[in-house]
Structure formats: structure tokens, C-alpha cells
Image (cartoon, rainbow, N blue to C red):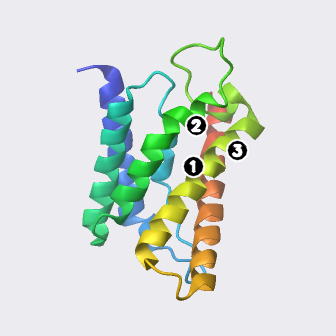
């Protein structure tokens, strides 16, 4: 078993446990929930197999769905992000860069990383809350949930990225 697989499995367990045990219980202003597990999908490097990204994304979504009794919401929205992530990351990577480039503020720059991560986090929140509501009956509440969750998730992701830049 490769060290990369063990590292990914460790991150998988860590993100699942943090989301289930800590972050899932936070609901700021009754609408903003930090969805940090999407950061796991943002971390896949450039040359990682697309089928593996889909498998990891779906598995993490399924674990969170089982814990919260939300049948398929997280799995579907996180798999959507997993489908788009490798293609979207290519837009922010210089053509002459290394094949195993990992997305981070340090490797692609702060603004590029901000665009990259905020788009994918927003996409995840849109899909998640659209599937959860499944209608636009109370669309203002839906917009508050999407915007609030996107902002708090991005704040957490940027905090982790800043700490990683200072450490490494």
C-alpha cells in the first residue's frame, strides 16, 4: 500500500470525524453551517486519477450522509464537485507546471486559489441546499443558507491554507 493512499485515508477519516462530531453541530444564525469536508476534494493533485477522485468524493459524502441521515444529499453534491475539480483545476495551472501539482495558495497563488476554491465551494453549497430544499418556496432562506455556508466554509479553508503556508 502506498504512502499516498494511507495519507488520503487518514485525511478522509479526519475530515469525516471533524464534520460529523464538531462542525455539523454548528448552525450560525440558523442558516450557515461549515461544510469543511469539501476541502478534501479541493486537495487532489493534478495527475490524480479522475475515477479515484469520484470514488473518494462519493465515499466521503456517503459517510456524512449516513451520519446525518440525509439520503444522498452530501454524496450527490460532493460527487458533482469531484467531477468538476480536475477540469476546473487545469484552468488555474500553467501548462509547463509539474504533473503532480497540488492545489494550494503556495503553488498557484492566492488569487487563483481563492477563485478555484470559492467556485467549487459555492457549487457544492448550491447543489447541497438545492437538493435539500428541492423547491424555491422559501428562496430567501435558501439564498441565506447558500451564502452563509459558502462564506463560513471559505473562511475555514483559507485559515487552513494560511496555516499550511506558515508551517511549510
Side (left or right) of 62 relative to 7: left
Density class for disc 2 (Cα within 10 Å; few <14, some 14-19, many ≥20) is: some
Density class for disc 3 (Cα within 10 Å; few <14, some 14-19, many ≥20) is: few
* Residue at mark 3: 115
Image quadrant in which you'd find residue 141: bottom right
Image quadrant in which you'd find residue 25: bottom left
Q: Residue at x 31, y 70 (%)?
A: 68
61 or 163: nearer the viewer: 61
Identify the mark at residue 88; answer none if there is no mark: 2
Identify the secondary structure beneath mark 3: helix
Please provide percent x and percent y for residue 101. 56, 21
Please provide percent x and percent y for residue 100. 51, 18
Side (left or right) of 83 relative to 166: left
Q: Are marks 1 and 2 in contact (CB under 8 Å)?
A: yes
Q: How many marks?
A: 3
Q: Can see residue 60?
A: yes
Identify the secondary structure beneath mark 2: helix
Q: Is residue 134 above or below residue 59?
A: below
Distance from label 1 to label 3 (Cα)?
Answer: 9 Å
Q: Residue at x 57, y 75 (%)?
A: 145
Distance from label 3 to label 2 (Cα)?
Answer: 10 Å
Q: Residue at x 63, y 14 (%)?
A: 97
Q: Is residue 126 above or below residue 58?
A: below
Identify the mark at residue 120; answer none if there is no mark: 1
Q: Earlier in the sequence, mark 1 or mark 3?
A: 3
Amino acid at each position: 500500500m502506498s504512502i499516498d493512499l494511507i495519507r488520503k485515508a487518514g485525511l478522509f477519516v479526519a475530515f469525516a470525524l471533524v464534520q460529523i462530531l464538531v462542525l455539523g453541530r454548528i448552525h450560525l444564525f440558523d442558516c450557515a453551517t461549515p461544510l469543511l469536508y469539501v476541502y478534501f476534494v479541493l486537495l487532489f493533485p493534478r495527475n490524480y486519477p479522475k475515477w479515484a477522485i469520484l470514488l473518494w468524493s462519493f465515499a466521503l459524502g456517503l459517510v456524512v450522509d449516513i451520519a446525518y441521515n440525509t439520503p444522498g444529499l452530501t454524496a450527490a453534491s460532493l460527487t458533482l464537485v469531484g467531477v468538476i475539480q480536475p477540469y476546473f483545476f487545469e484552468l488555474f495551472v500553467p501548462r509547463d507546471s509539474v504533473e503532480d501539482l497540488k492545489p494550494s495558495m503556495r503553488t498557484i497563488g492566492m488569487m487563483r486559489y481563492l477563485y478555484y476554491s470559492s467556485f467549487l465551494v459555492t457549487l457544492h453549497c448550491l447543489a447541497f441546499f438545492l437538493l435539500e430544499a428541492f423547491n424555491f418556496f422559501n428562496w430567501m432562506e435558501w439564498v441565506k443558507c447558500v451564502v452563509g455556508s459558502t462564506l463560513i466554509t471559505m473562511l475555514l479553508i483559507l485559515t487552513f491554507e494560511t496555516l499550511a503556508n506558515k508551517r511549510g
